[in-house]
Image: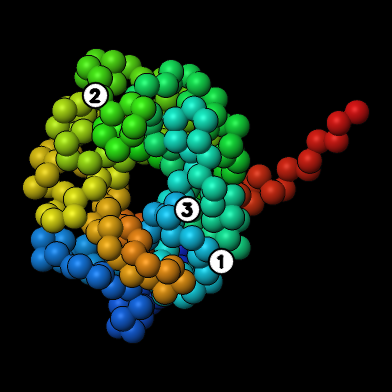
Amino acid sequence: MQRDRNRIAVLALAAVVACFAGAAALAGGLSDRKPHDGVAAAHGMPVQGIDVSYFQGDINWKKVDAAGIRFAYIKATEGADRLDPKFHDNWRGARKAGIVRGAYHVMYWCSPARDQAAWFAAQVPADRGTLPPVLDVEWNGHSKTCPHQIARKEALAKMKVMLAAMEAHSGKRPIIYTDPKFHRDVLQGAFTDYQFWLRSTAAKPAAKYPGRDWSFWQFTTTGRVPGVTGPVDRNSYNGTPAQWARVVKRLQTEQAATDAVPETVSQ
């Protein structure tokens, strides 16, 4: 009997997810300023999300939720000393609006991985009801202080340290975000036991990352979403509404268990 009730609850949640996603698409709430034919399939995927940083300014998370966005990855830290100025505002705002969220760290190749791990842990709450943390790995070509690339072996070693530390802090196996160039230079054939979030704005992921499974697809950097002023990165989840509903239910259960633990009073 309890199993049946749980199954009904999951199916109901899946229906709500599908309903919201479909309604948003029909209403034109989610769009792209410069759509590319190569990623048209991503727009039709049922579970849509965004990733944000201080570049998006103040976000109206209630409007984002109403538009059909089901998840958000929020920039938290970069290197060993940079905190995104909007991280804590976005972290609280997304949760208050009921949007599933996760934090991401941008790897800086000129800083020791252990220092970066300590910085991430110091800034990002170890909330249980969130998506796994993300390690964003790209070449820091935009950096004025660290524009050079490092050897593949060294990059992989730094990543292993960072991934292990993020898992220890969050209690969840991190997800790896990357772009085609870094994947080709460093990640091809590596970290096959991790989930991936792939950037591909002109083609399906399979065309840019042959043989690589993925959980999230960043398909445009010129997205338009009510509640966000200006362009925003849009993403899709590689799964059905029912599969996403199970993800959400698991996170809700984890958060409820965390909230039920009384706070320890220091003596």
Residue 81 point in image, percent of width and height: 52, 30
Occupied quadrant, residue 222: bottom left
Q: Could you tell me if residue 14 is visible in this image? A: no
Q: Which residue is mark 1?
A: 97
Q: CA distance from mark 3 to mark 2?
A: 26 Å
The quadrant of the picture occupied by the C terminus is top right
| Residue found farthest to the bottom | 27
The crowding category of the residue bearing disc 3, from other C-alpha atoms within 10 Å (few below 14, some 14 to 19, many at least 20), is some
The amino acid type of the residue labelled 3 equals: Tyr
Q: Are marks 2 and 1 in contact (CB under 8 Å)?
A: no
- From the viewer's perspective, is 266 left or right of 211? right
Q: How is the image coloured?
A: rainbow
The amino acid type of the residue labelled 2 equals: Gln
The crowding category of the residue bearing disc 2, from other C-alpha atoms within 10 Å (few below 14, some 14 to 19, many at least 20), is some
- Image position of 170 with respect to 255: above or below: above
Occupied quadrant, residue 182: top left
- Image position of 5 with respect to 142: above or below: below
Q: Could you tell me if residue 122 is visible in this image? A: yes
Q: Which residue is mark 2?
A: 149
Q: CA distance from mark 1 to mark 3?
A: 18 Å
Q: Earlier in the sequence, mark 2 or mark 1?
A: 1
The residue positioned 30% from the left and 50% from the top of the image is: 216
The crowding category of the residue bearing disc 1, from other C-alpha atoms within 10 Å (few below 14, some 14 to 19, many at least 20), is some
| Residue found farthest to the right | 267
Q: Which residue is mark 3?
A: 54
- From the viewer's perspective, is 223 left or right of 72? left
- Image position of 116 with respect to 229: above or below: above
- Secondary structure beneath label 1: helix
Occupied quadrant, residue 223: bottom left
Q: Pick whichever, 56 or 46, lies toward us.
A: 56
Q: CA distance from mark 2 to mark 1?
A: 40 Å
Residue 187 point in image, percent of width and height: 21, 29
